[in-house]
């Protein structure tokens, strides 16, 4: 009799316990989905931001290294000429290996001919956007994407060099540089990283009008 009463007591307790309705379960699941979705979106956004910042930092570092290499080449040059090419612009430098062996050592014969070695830098269009160019350097072949050594990507304009003259004959020929880099120029133009400089040809004679540079 005692056992039967115990069973009835347990049955009444079980029947008296209220569970979750279907609507309550759906509401809880919906709230959980919203919370999990927000957390996932935040994590994805943070990951994309970190990836973007890393990529932009790499682009900027490559631009700084290229400018440093370009500065060495221009300092060693005795003449400079900026000319257009099929896909951008080319900077032709005449470098005397007797003055700056390090510029061309181990890189093969120059393209300048004669007693001087030539160094070429060029911009080459990548795609058809009109705002993405690669920067290349060579001392062996004509400067293009197929043969030259790649330096920087996502340069936003083809014309990055300008020949410059001193105000009088006591100044050396120089090259002005404007190197803007931005991998997302279409949507975030404010993120353009720009390097500018004016570099003299230390092996040029004082400008007298006989070189490529024109006032």
Image (cartoon, rainbow, N blue to C red):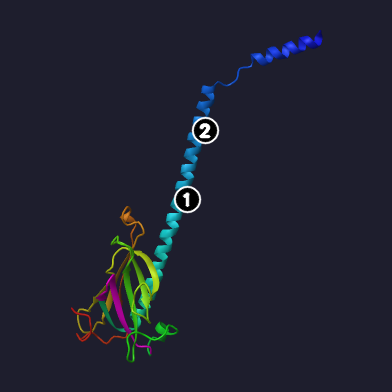
Q: Residues within 10 Å of mark 2 (few under 14, many from 20)?
A: few
Q: Is residue 110 visible?
A: yes
Q: Are marks 2 and 1 in contact (CB under 8 Å)?
A: no
What is the chief secondary structure element of the magenta stretch? Answer: strand
How many labels were placed on the picture? Answer: 2
Residue 178 x %, y %: 29, 68
Give the magenta part as a residue range.
Answer: 83-97
Return the mark for residue 31. Answer: none
Residue 122 lies in quadrant: bottom left
Residue located 43% across and 82% down the image = 107
How far apart marks 2 and 1 lie (CA) works out to: 22 Å
Q: Residue at the top extreme?
A: 1
Residue 167 lies in quadrant: bottom left
Residue located 44% across and 47% down the image = 45
- Above or below — where is 18 with respect to 132? above
Residue 200 lies in quadrant: bottom left
Q: Is residue 200 visible?
A: no
Q: Closest to the observer: 21 or 146?
A: 146
Residue located 43% across and 56% down the image = 53
Q: Closest to the observer: 85 or 75?
A: 85
Secondary element under disc 2, as helix, strand or loop, is: helix
Q: N-terminal of the two: label 2 or label 1?
A: 2
Residue 187 x %, y %: 32, 52
- Above or below — where is 34 with respect to 120? above
Residue on which disc 1 sits: 47
Q: Residues within 10 Å of mark 1 (few under 14, many from 20)?
A: few
Residue 118 x %, y %: 34, 84
Secondary element under disc 1, as helix, strand or loop, is: helix
In which quadrant is the N terminus drawn?
top right
Is 147 displayed left or right of 161 in the figure? right
Residue on which disc 2 sits: 32
Assess whether residue 87 is covered by the magenta stretch. Answer: yes
């Amino acid at each position: 009799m005692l056992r039967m009463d115990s069973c009835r007591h347990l049955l009444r307790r079980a029947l008296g316990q209220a569970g979750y309705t279907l609507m309550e379960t759906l509401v809880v699941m919906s709230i959980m989905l919203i919370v999990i979705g927000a957390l996932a979106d935040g994590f994805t956004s943070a990951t994309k931001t970190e990836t973007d910042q890393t990529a932009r930092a790499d682009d900027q570092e490559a631009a700084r290294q290229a400018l440093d290499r370009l500065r060495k080449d221009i300092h060693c040059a005795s003449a400079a000429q900026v000319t257009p090419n099929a896909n951008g612009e080319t900077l032709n430098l005449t470098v005397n290996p007797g003055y700056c062996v390090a510029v061309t050592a181990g890189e093969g014969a120059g393209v300048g001919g004669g007693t001087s070695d030539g160094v070429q830098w060029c911009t080459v269009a990548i795609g058809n956007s009109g705002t993405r160019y690669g920067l290349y350097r060579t001392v062996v072949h004509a400067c293009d994407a197929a043969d030259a050594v790649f330096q920087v990507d996502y340069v936003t304009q083809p014309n990055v060099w300008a020949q410059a003259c001193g105000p009088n004959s006591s100044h050396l020929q120089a090259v002005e540089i404007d190197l803007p880099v931005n991998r997302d120029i279409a949507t975030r133009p404010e993120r353009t990283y720009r390097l500018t400089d004016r570099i003299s040809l230390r092996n040029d004679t004082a400008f007298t009008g006989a070189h490529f540079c024109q006032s």
